[in-house]
Image: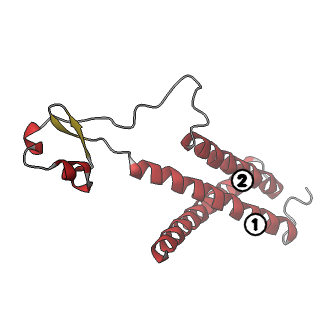
């Protein structure tokens, strides 16, 4: 239980720090566009929410892609057991059936000639995209707070 909680806390904190970095870069880019591109700070209050909506949209699309919602109806994923590598029949000799079915060789697939290395899911890629969802969501929350502060405290966007 404690390990799960610490993993969750680590993911949330990584997402928060990534979102903070992304928000800082966004505010700097937005300020530069408002001052240099449009020649008025008023536009900062319009550019920041555009980025905010973009980040929410990106997080949602990444989530939908991971959830297989965007896959075509007729297409199916490849079978779960995919093989990669050379068949090495000598590896199965001397190993009992109990061990073949257990954890010792769970990363291998048994075929008629022996064992073949199983191609696992690319967990680092999945973790990266899952973390990007957190980063985009945290950045959207932080940009919302920045927009509110800019409007309420400094009046940016309240009048031209």
**Outermost residue, right direction?**
159
Is residue 76 toward the left or the right of residue 30 in the image?
left
Which color scheme did the rendering employ for the protein?
secondary structure
Is residue 102 toward the left or the right of residue 46 in the image?
left
Q: Residue at the spot x=14%, y=32% of the render?
A: 113
State the image quarter where residue 143 is shown: bottom right
Residue 30 placed where, x, y %? 70, 54
Which residue is label 1 attached to?
A: 145
Which residue is label 2 attached to?
A: 52
The secondary structure type at the circle numbered 2 is helix
Residue 155 placed where, x, y %? 87, 66
The reply to whether discs 1 and 2 touch (Cβ–Cβ < 8 Å) is no
Residue 1 placed where, x, y %? 49, 74
The secondary structure type at the circle numbered 1 is helix
Query: Could you tell me how far apart the alpha carbons at marks 1 and 2 are, in whole angstroms?
Result: 11 Å
Q: Residue at the spot x=63%, y=42% of the render?
A: 61
- For the residue pair 120 and 35, the one nearer the viewer reads as 120
State the image quarter where residue 41 is shown: bottom right
**Outermost residue, top direction?**
74
Q: Residue at the spot x=26%, y=53% of the render?
A: 102
- For the residue pair 105 and 26, the one nearer the viewer reads as 105
* Above or below: residue 118 compared with residue 30: above
């Amino acid at each position: 239980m404690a390990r799960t909680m610490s993993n969750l806390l680590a993911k949330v904190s990584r997402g928060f720090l990534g979102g903070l970095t992304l928000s800082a870069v966004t505010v700097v880019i937005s300020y530069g566009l408002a001052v240099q591109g449009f020649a008025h700070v008023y536009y900062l209050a319009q550019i920041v929410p555009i980025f905010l909506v973009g980040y929410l949209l990106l997080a949602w699309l990444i989530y939908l892609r991971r959830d297989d919602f965007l896959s075509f109806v007729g297409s199916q994923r490849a079978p779960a057991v995919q093989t990669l590598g050379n068949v090495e029949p000598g590896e199965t000799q001397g190993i009992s059936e109990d061990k073949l079915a257990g954890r010792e060789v769970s990363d291998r697939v048994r075929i008629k000639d022996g064992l073949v290395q199983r191609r696992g899911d690319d967990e680092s890629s999945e973790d990266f995209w899952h973390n990007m969802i957190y980063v985009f969501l945290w950045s959207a929350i932080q940009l919302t707070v920045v927009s509110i502060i800019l409007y309420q405290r400094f009046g940016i966007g309240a009048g031209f």
